[in-house]
Image (tube, rainbow, N blue to C red):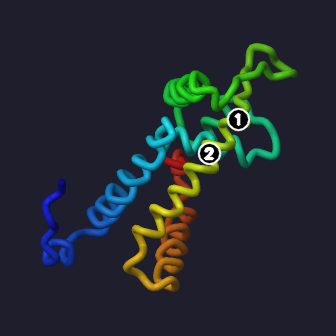
Amino acid sequence: MNAPVDPGCVSRAGLNWLLHRAAHKLGSVAQDAAARHGITTRGQLVLSALASEEYRRTQLALGQALGLDKTTLTAELDRLERAGLVVREPDPTDRRVRVPVITERGRTVQAEVEELQVEVENDFTAGLEPAEAHCLRALLERLIVADHRPGSGSCL
């Protein structure tokens, strides 16, 4: 259990520390929600990307879109495939290339974990007015989208 944080420390903390503490607090609860379904937060990110795909992406393209290196994505896809949540099919234009595809079971798990994560976010922001929670999200999105450096596109 974490010791309480001195409000005086919080008021003098830098933005990096505040964002890190908020992300850690939210992330650990979100990870617990994903773990209830046998996946990680990163696994949920991959499943969400595959569930929302209107077209199929190669593993390489998926990794680039999510900001995951080849080794990390391959390990995550291995775990998801062993769990029956994704399959990797050969690309019809290049049989050396694999295309990850979410299974029906994967879609079910992704939807259930997404629902839990929405609850987690709602609990996390429960002390804010709805307009404040919306504003927080909008400001964070604006800060993130404004970052155009190479490698800044990661979803993690």
Q: Position of residue 133 (x, y in %)?
A: 48, 78
Is disc 2 surrounded by few (<14), some (14 to 19) or many (20+) residues within 10 Å?
Answer: many
Location of residue 76 in the rendering, given as x and y in whole percent from the top left corner: 53, 30
Q: Which of disc 1 and disc 2 is earlier in sequence?
A: 1
Circles 2 and 1, Cβ within 8 Å, touching? The answer is: yes
Left/right of residue 58 with respect to residue 31 in the rendered view: right
Relative vertical location of residue 136 with respect to residue 119 in this rendering, above or below: below
The residue at 53%/26% (across/down) is: 79
Return the x and y of residue 29 as percentages of the image width and height. 38, 54
Q: Which residue is mark 1?
A: 102
Instruction: Compute the Cα span from label 2 to label 1.
Output: 9 Å
Q: Report the label total.
A: 2
Crowd rating for badge 1 (residues with CA inside 10 Å; few <14, some 14–19, many 20+): many
Among the 4 quarters of the image, the one containing residue 104: top right
Q: Which residue is mark 2?
A: 110
Of residues 119 and 41, the one nearer the viewer is 119
Which residue of the protein is positioned furthest toward the top in this rendering?
Answer: 96
Q: Position of residue 94 (x, y in %)?
A: 82, 18
Quadrant for the N terminus, please.
bottom left
Label 1 sits on what residue type? Ile
The answer to whether residue 31 is above or below residue 131 is above
Q: Secondary structure at mark 1?
A: strand
Q: Amino acid at mark 2?
A: Gln
Residue plotted at (66% across, 43% down): 108
